[in-house]
Image (cartoon, coloured by chain):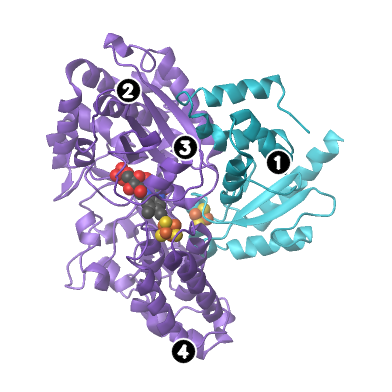
Chain colours: A cyan, B purple
Amino acid sequence: MSKFNDEQLKEFSRLVARYPEGKQKSALLPVLHLAQDSFGGWLSADTMDYVAELLQINPIEVYEVATFYSMYNLKPIGKHLFEVCQTGPCMINGSDDIIEYIGTTLGIKPGETTADGMFTLKTVECLGACGYAPMMQMGKHYREHLTKEKIDAIIEECRKNAAANN
Amino acid sequence: MGVKLLLDKAHVPGIRFFETYRKEGGYKAVEKALKQMNPASIVEEVKKSGVRGRGGAGFPAGMKWSFIAKPEGVPRHLVCNADESEPGTFKDRYLMEFLPHLLIEGLIISSFALGSNDTYIYIRGEYAWIVDILEQAIDEAHANGFLGKNILGTGFDCNIYVQRGAGAYICGEETALIESLEGKRGNPRIKPPFPAIEGLWKRPTVVNNVETLAAVVPIINMGGDEYAKIGVGRSTGTKLISACGNINKPGVYEIDMTISVEEFLYSDEYCGGIANGKRLKACIPGGSSVPILPANLLLKTAKGETRLMNYESLSDGGFASGSMMGSGGFIVLDEDQCIVKNTYTLARFYRHESCGQCSPCREGTGWMEKILKNIDTGKGKMSDIDLLWDIQRKIEGNTICPLGDAAAWPVAAAIRHFRDEFEWHVNHPEEAQKRNYGLAHYADPIHVPA
Ligand SMILES: Cc1cc2nc3c(=O)[nH]c(=O)nc-3n(C[C@H](O)[C@H](O)[C@H](O)COP(=O)(O)O)c2cc1C
Ligand code: SF4
Ligand code: FES
């Protein structure tokens, strides 16, 4: 099972120190983000048990939270996660076409990952970028005013980076 | 040009950083508040300003602050609500991204007024890059003696922490937010007790929106009375509006609440009119939860008066012919937009976001989504429209938190104002699948492009 390295443990301590004595459970959401970022973009049962142990809470308290919030992935995802907004304001500005275009370009449906493990497509609800629609989240950042050309360029960029890193 | 109290410096290069912000007059309000005023006099100024909560409910901030309990020996907390998840709303993001120090300054003053030594910003998890911006601003404020121990030698200690959520609209509701901040699922609490008595870790807590807390800075700088002179009636000060949909200039605008909806929508200073030379069909003026209005009722009230961009005027006519200011998310639909489809996406949103504690909300949002999807995809029956109406009525008012109402109102208003479009969908299942399915007779005749 993977454990936090020294640097990650330092970040863990920084997060826990924000709350009063005995209230370390409050750090659960940020610690789950840290764990997800550290261990391959998703939370396995082992990871959740590890987080419970670190925070000295019951594993069930971690599972409850991990299943409630949409940003925690409970199964492995592709190297690049495309989270495309489909709520009203984005729909008005053509998010349906964008979702369909990504789907046909990559040969996957929302919720699926490409066979090479490179891309996962997910539909999400309003991300607070309605004025810059259509949009999607990629990791820590937003890609806004999406067009088919932009999607092509983004996919190309991901593939190039992967090739360069191999 | 209208008055600008919050965004006046948003375009100054480098304003995101302490040095520039300070040079432009930043942190003067903190100096004034901590050195020349006391907590009670700050609360008094905020009361006088008449500023109403900018998160959606519009409750007067000064009054909320005066309710906070002060039991001996129990710490109190201020929590800044930066969850901003109401569809159509992206103003807090703008403020935090471009003017992080304005929020930090407002938080220091408000923390002093409320006696909060540990203040938390709860930000939606997706705004990950803004967390870095805020944390950098907080570090700069520490380095310059505006945060930490004994601020400006006044004996007041204050720390601000940024807590990321993880994707849940319901965590914008203040008691769900508190639960989430305690490391739990975002299930709203039954009130009372109110957070002002028993909030975070059972301690007295005030939760306020980002924009409300930023507004404390101009209120302290200019005084509550002067602030109250801006705007009209009980809509004092300025309001940030995030405008989106089929308009020429989507974006975040600061308005003083005296301008008309027509000016906001059509003038080049703001939305710049409907995109692609089309006509206005409808608008959701205050975030997805508030009632949608057809063009004619948006620009004028049922009595034929000019509708203004403020709390009173937008709600003029009640739910029969009015809407609400809400969170200031202004969503514009042009003549080609389909009301059924738009309502369906919003119903799906609320079903997705219901925490599931109350059966009317959990089950009702699911049913509304299903029925709307059927009508939208040409599988609807005429009786479905009445069924939808019934369901939304059974949710409203029968739940622990207002998410139930927020899910019911958009459906109710869409049926109330656009019933024949729902009927048309049922009667024309095939035509309704084509791209352009709006019933054009709703479009605004006033602004037919030349
Ligand atoms: C379902 C739901 C979602 C909400 N989301 C937000 C939000 O994202 N941001 C916000 O400031 N207030 C939100 N609110 C309102 C808060 O409960 C609370 O009234 C507000 O934070 C108080 O701050 P204010 O008085 O400064 O507006 C929401 C309320 C409900 C019922
Ligand atoms: S109204 Fe909906 S979101 Fe609110 S507590 Fe009930 S089930 Fe949860
Ligand atoms: S609707 Fe897509 S970001 Fe708001």
How far apart are labels 2 and 4 at the CA level? 60 Å
Label 1 crowd (10 A; few <14 / some 14-19 / many >=20): many
Q: Is residue B6 above or below residue B421?
A: above
Chain letter for the residue marked with disc 1 in the picture = A
How far apart are labels 3 and 4 at the CA level? 47 Å
Q: Are marks 3 and 2 in contact (CB under 8 Å)?
A: no
Chain letter for the residue marked with disc 2 in the picture = B
Residue placed furthest toward the right: A166
Label 3 crowd (10 A; few <14 / some 14-19 / many >=20): many
Chain letter for the residue marked with disc 3 in the picture = B
Residue B397 x, y percent position in the rendering? 32, 65
Q: From where the camera sits, is residue B271 visible?
A: no
Q: Mark 1 points at which residue?
A: A41
Q: Do the residues labelled 3 and 1 touch (CB within 8 Å)?
A: no
| Residue occupying image coordinates x 18% and y 30% | B222
| Residue occupying image coordinates x 22% and y 21% | B33
Do pointers 2 and 4 mark residues of a single chain?
Answer: yes
How far apart are labels 4 and 1 at the CA level? 46 Å
Labels 3, 4: front one: 3
Residue A42 x, y percent position in the rendering? 70, 43
**Mark 2 belongs to which amino acid?**
Gly
Return the mark for residue B382: 4
- Judged left or right of residue A60, residue B201 is left
- Judged left or right of residue B218, residue B444 is right
**In front here: B319 or B215?**
B319
Residue A81 x, y percent position in the rendering? 69, 48
**Mark 4 belongs to which amino acid?**
Met
**Mark 1 belongs to which amino acid?**
Gly
How far apart are labels 1 and 2 at the CA level? 40 Å
Which image quarter holds the N terminus of chain A?
A: top right
Q: Earlier in the sequence, mark 3 or mark 4?
A: 3
